[in-house]
Structure formats: C-alpha cells, structure tokens
Image (spheres, rainbow, N blue to C red):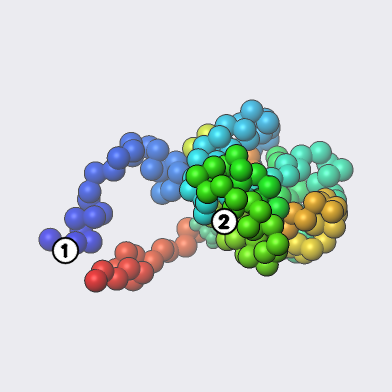
Amino acid sequence: MTATTVLQTAPLAIDEEAADRIFRTARTTSLWTDADVSDTQLEAAWDLAKMGPTQMNTLPLRVLAVRSPEAKDRLVAHMADGNKSKVSAAPVSLVLAADPAFHEHLDVLFPVYPGIKDQLAPAAETREQMARNNAFLQAGYLVVALRAVGLAAGPMNGMDAEGIDREFFGDSGWKSFLVVNVGVADGEGSPYPRGPRLSFDQVAQTL
Ligand SMILES: Cc1cc2nc3c(=O)[nH]c(=O)nc-3n(C[C@H](O)[C@H](O)[C@H](O)COP(=O)(O)O)c2cc1C
C-alpha cells in the first residue's frame, strides 16, 4: 500500500458529513436560494474564523457586510463586468479588507511581546505587508467558517479595489482585497462542473 493510499483512507478527526460540508461538496457559490443571511449567522462564522492563527495574533482582517440594495449598487459599480451580476444576486456580499493599523490592538492581542505596538508604528511598509498576508489567511478561515454555519461562499477579486476603498473606507486606511458573496446555496450552488484538484503527490515533497 502506498503512502498516498494510507492517507486517503485514514480516518478523519471530524465526521464525514462535516468534511463534506466544509470541503468535499462545498462549492464556490453563485446560485442562491432566497433565504436571508442574518447578522447572527455572520457573527457565528466570525466567532469561528477569529480563532484561526495569524502572525503575532494580529487579526488584520476587517469586514464590511453589504446587504441593502443601495449599498449593493455602490459595490457593483466597482466590480469587474463578469462579477457584477454575482454581487447583485447574493443575499449579502462581504468586502474583506486588510487594516495596516492592526498594531493599535497589539497591547491587548499580543501581550506576550510588550512594546511591539510602538516598534511597528513607524514601519508602515512592513505593516501593510503583514496586514495583507494575514488578512488573506483569515479570509480562508472565514470561507470555511461560513460553510461550518451552513452558509455558502463565493469569493472573488475581479474588482477595482482602490475604487472600493474610496467608496467605503474613507481615511481608515483599510485596503480591500476580496469580495465574498454569502447565502444559502441553491443545489450545488455553481453552474460550472467541479474542477479537478492537485494530489498530495503533485504538491508535496518529503525530506
Ligand atoms: C482569491 C480568489 C479570487 C477569485 N476571483 C474570482 C472572480 O473574480 N470571479 C469569479 O467568478 N470567481 C472568482 N473566484 C472563484 C474561483 O474561480 C473558484 O473558487 C475556484 O474555481 C474553485 O471553485 P469550486 O470551489 O467551485 O471548486 C475566486 C476565488 C478566489 C479564492
């Protein structure tokens, strides 16, 4: 038996249904039922996603939930043509942004390193890079968390991010990098066939 076969048949530490819901049958969704998404559901997803690890516990992800038709129109104006109808159709669209001023929270979030807040304050470029890297990581956790609370997610970055920042974020410094449509999937949730994935053997090396 090869190592790959052993891994594929290894028992999971979560039940099969959870693995299907979170990974195996979950699709990047663009077909929705008309079920609403409540703030309570979004908060439940955040309460899972926030526990995912980030560098020095920085948690630089910021989220703007766009739900009203007026706010949706403002967002759609900055989406790539192929993504406009997907944002319009989704029950709620989350604009995910990275906050380069994440260091302001570090006295509370990372007390094991006293002084890190002041150390990072003059390092604007470092903070921008850290914010983007770690916010992207958190975006992945959030997609998985949304699935765990029974919702479906459709992430997309075909958009004018600077336009979105001017439209919604003013002088806050938040930098948008992804829009995630959220709702309850209609059927499989996607009109496209599932794309293949790379196997462990194709992506991993062991030394
Ligand atoms: C960072 C990121 C950016 C994406 N941008 C777009 C986009 O602009 N428009 C779009 O329709 N789909 C976009 N997608 C969706 C991907 O094409 C989709 O997640 C991938 O093909 C896997 O699909 P599946 O989850 O249904 O298997 C994006 C996904 C990610 C994670």
**Which residue does the image show at 60% across and 39% down from the upper left?**
108
Label 2: which secondary element: helix
The tag on residue 134 is 2
**Which residue does the image show at 59% across and 53% down from the upper left?**
116
**Which residue does the image show at 41% across and 49% down from the upper left?**
24
Q: Which of 181 and 177 is in front in this view?
A: 177
Quarter location, residue 186: top right
Q: Which of marks 2 and 1 is in front?
A: 2
Residue contact at pointers 2 and 1, CB within 8 angstroms: no
Q: Nearer the viewer, residue 25 or 169?
A: 169
Label 1: which secondary element: loop
**Location of residue 4 with respect to 39 vertically, above or below:** below
**Location of residue 98 with respect to 146 vertically, above or below:** below
Give the quarter of the figure containing the N terminus: bottom left
* Residue 86 x, y percent position in the rendering: 70, 52
Q: What residue type is labelled 2?
A: Asn
How many circles with numbers are drawn on the protein?
2
Residue ranking furthest to the front: 115
**Which residue does the image show at 63% across and 40% down from the upper left?**
183
